[in-house]
Image: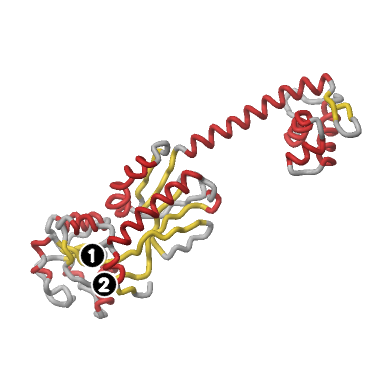
Amino acid sequence: MVSSDKLPPLPSIRAFEAAARLESFAKAAQELGTTAASVSYHVRQLERQTGLHLFVRHPHKVALTAAGAAIAREASAAFAALHESFMRAQDQDEARLSLTTLPTLGTSWLTPRLGLFRARHPDISIELELSAEPHALGDGRFDGAIRHGLGEWRGLRSVGLFPILFIPLCAPALKDAAAGLENPGKPLDVPLLGRPDWWDIWYRALGVTAGPSPERFGTSLAAEHLDIAAAVAGHGIAIGSPILFRDEIAAGRLVPAHDLVAGDGRAFWFVYSVARLQSAKIARFRDWLCDAAATEVAAARAHINNAIILDP
């Protein structure tokens, strides 16, 4: 007998519901991806546990008993409601895209363009978190991320966007003051801004082994876009991406303090879990993002072609 606080096993109920709806153990087995013998076993287990005869067996089909019909109506309604709840949850999930990316790329490049994605896909809302540290993508919190690196992350599908490049940038008024930039030991009238290791990459590409001394640096800021903001204000020479800050260069707010462009082989990548390969919202964002990145690559083709790329 069925206890008052415990249901029969769900596989048995599922097998019974399918057999009752299709009036056939064989058809139920085909729908459930199992065998008719397995369906029959689960139904007999259910009959044994409930003490009820649920089917009358015929050579080529089965027919519900009165007790079986009463249970089948409720079981079918319950599975239909459960299916509907999963469909609603899927629809809600597909209408919300949660992303994480780096502060500079998110602030300077992605955020100003997200309105274009929303205009194309108004049914998808965007949630964007900026973080210097990568977040896991397998726990359901984030659907995708834009990361920097070589494109190799276990369990993730990676789609390349554009390379990470470095070029010295300054306000037009500081162009003359940057004339001695090639010699890292020569005093400058204007300080350097940005990460010393990025400056080291640039100087190595220039053919200079030793990077700039600590005395050459001005204010230390937490992110590349802050260094660029300081450079626009005329507070120093920043090391930054000619792709991410193409708008500032095109508008004349920044100019290259030197023509050399350097890189270390890394790039920006859109990544998402391989378990989400069938997600329509991720596919839509990926396709839009690749189109936007292709536009940037085309506009920065001269910088990319002339860049000196060092080993990472």
Query: Is residue 8 visible to the viewer in this orientation of the structure?
Result: no
In the displayed structure, does residue 196 sit left or right of residue 58? left
Residue 100, placed above or below residue 197: above
Tell whether 56 sits left or right of 159: right
For the N terminus, give its image quadrant.
top right
Kind of residue indicated by mark 1:
Ile
Question: How far across and down, in percent of the image, does residue 140 sit?
Answer: 50, 44
Helix, strand or loop at disc 2? helix
Mark 1 or mark 2: which comes first in sequence? 2
Q: Which residue is mark 2?
A: 202
Q: Position of residue 131 (x, y in %)?
A: 36, 51
- Across and down, in percent, residue 240 comes to 25, 62
Residue 16 is situated, as x and y percent measured from the top left of the image, at 78, 31
Identify the residue shown where x is 16% and y is 68%. 257
Tell me the crowding category of disc 1: few under 14, some 14 to 19, or many 20 or more residues within 10 angstroms, Cα based: many
Q: Label 2 sits on what residue type?
A: Trp
Q: Residue furthest right?
A: 59
* Residue located at (31% from left, 54% from top): 105
Nearer to the camera, 246 or 218: 246
Q: Is residue 166 left or right of residue 251?
A: right
Name the residue located 77 percent from the left edge and 20 percent from the top edge.
70
Find numbered disc 1 in the image and state the secondary structure of the residue it sits on.
strand
Q: Quadrant of residue 68?
A: top right
Given residues 248 and 120, the one toward you in this image is 120
In the drawing, does residue 77 fall left or right of residue 192?
A: right
Q: Quadrant of residue 218?
A: bottom left
Q: Which residue: 19% across, 57% down? A: 250
Q: Nearer the viewer, residue 221 or 127?
A: 127
Identify residue for label 1: 239
Q: CA distance from mark 1 to mark 2?
A: 9 Å
Residue contact at pointers 1 and 2, CB within 8 angstroms:
yes
